[in-house]
Image: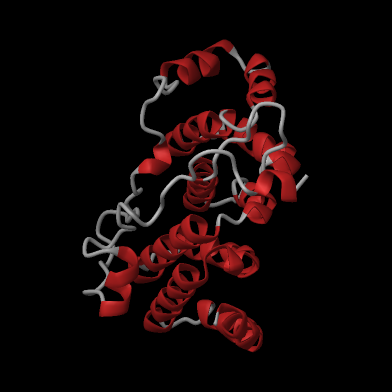
């Protein structure tokens, strides 16, 4: 059962972390597949492990070896989609200030994805992201002024995903922005009832000329789908009030 599997995983926590730091791309790739499968099998029970592994995965997304970076991107998406690790928000916010533009962009992407997979709280209730509102909004504020256009674009998308959870805090943030940033935000405001950024998979990024990953194994296809990205059913937004709203007050 899941409790027995989680108990057995405690002894593998550090060895798996060491494998993510391995210089051999095949070891890193298979470790990412293993973590993704565990997240798929255990769901939110795997959240503490997702919180632990997201920082090394984020570092890997900045690697120039595409086998490593793409595997890490897919794995991080699977962890966020399957476990909804709200406790990882401060770590994502820290990574959003990384010196690597790629890491900053991916940190915002996963924060955006997390916000879109969590159901917004009912009116008057505390939501699962409230306790980390300062960290998330400070990261977005800084990213809206980032020197890289992709990071700024992801910051705007993340802003609107967070706005569904903390509208008053987001309005306060918007009120402190310069006119140009506010204009760009308003231009990208989602239409009422429109698709949210997390409803469709974000394809992994790879720079021009980078080595492409080899064909996926059957376990990898089961997690990521035949196209090599999280399948459409992999990351479904919660519907209705979040079950975590009361538990995390």
User: Could you tell whether 209 is left or right of 238 in the image?
Assistant: left
- Image point 66% across, 40% down: which residue? 136
In the image, is residue 216 above or below residue 138?
below
Tell which residue pokes out farthest to the right in this image. Answer: 249
User: Could you tell whether 236 is left or right of 6 in the image?
Assistant: left
One can see residue 62 in this view: no
- Name the one closer to the observer, 220 or 145: 220
- Name the one closer to the observer, 122 or 19: 122
Q: Position of residue 133 (x, y in %)?
A: 71, 37
Question: Which image quadrant is residue 17 in?
Answer: bottom right
- Image point 39% across, 62% down: which residue? 74
User: Count of labels shown?
Assistant: 0
In the image, is residue 43 above or below residue 164?
below
Tell which residue pokes out farthest to the top in this image. Answer: 179
Question: Which image quadrant is residue 64 in?
Answer: bottom left
Q: Position of residue 216 (x, y in %)?
A: 25, 74
- Name the one closer to the observer, 199 or 75: 199
In the image, is residue 219 above or below residue 56?
below
């Amino acid at each position: 059962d899941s409790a027995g599997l989680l108990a057995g995983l405690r002894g593998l926590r550090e060895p798996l972390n060491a494998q993510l730091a391995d210089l051999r791309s095949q070891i890193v790739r298979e470790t990412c597949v293993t973590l993704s499968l565990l997240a798929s099998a255990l769901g939110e029970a795997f959240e503490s492990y997702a919180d632990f592994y997201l920082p090394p995965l984020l570092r890997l997304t900045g690697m120039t070896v595409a086998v490593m970076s793409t595997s890490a991107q897919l794995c991080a998406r699977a962890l966020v989609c399957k476990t909804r690790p709200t406790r990882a928000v401060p770590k994502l916010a820290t990574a959003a200030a990384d010196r690597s533009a790629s890491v900053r962009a991916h940190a915002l992407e996963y924060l955006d994805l997390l916000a879109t997979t969590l159901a917004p709280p009912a009116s008057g209730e505390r939501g699962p992201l409230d306790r980390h509102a300062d960290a998330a909004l400070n990261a977005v504020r800084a990213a809206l002024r980032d020197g890289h256009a992709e990071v700024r674009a992801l910051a705007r998308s993340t802003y609107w995903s967070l706005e569904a959870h903390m509208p008053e805090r987001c309005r306060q943030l918007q009120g402190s922005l310069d006119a140009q940033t506010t204009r760009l935000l308003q231009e990208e405001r989602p239409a009422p009832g429109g698709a949210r950024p997390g409803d469709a998979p974000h394809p992994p990024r790879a720079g021009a000329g980078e080595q492409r990953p080899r064909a996926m194994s059957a376990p990898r296809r089961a997690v990521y789908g035949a196209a090599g990205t999280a399948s459409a059913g992999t990351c479904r937004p919660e519907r209705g009030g979040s079950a975590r709203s009361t538990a995390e007050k």
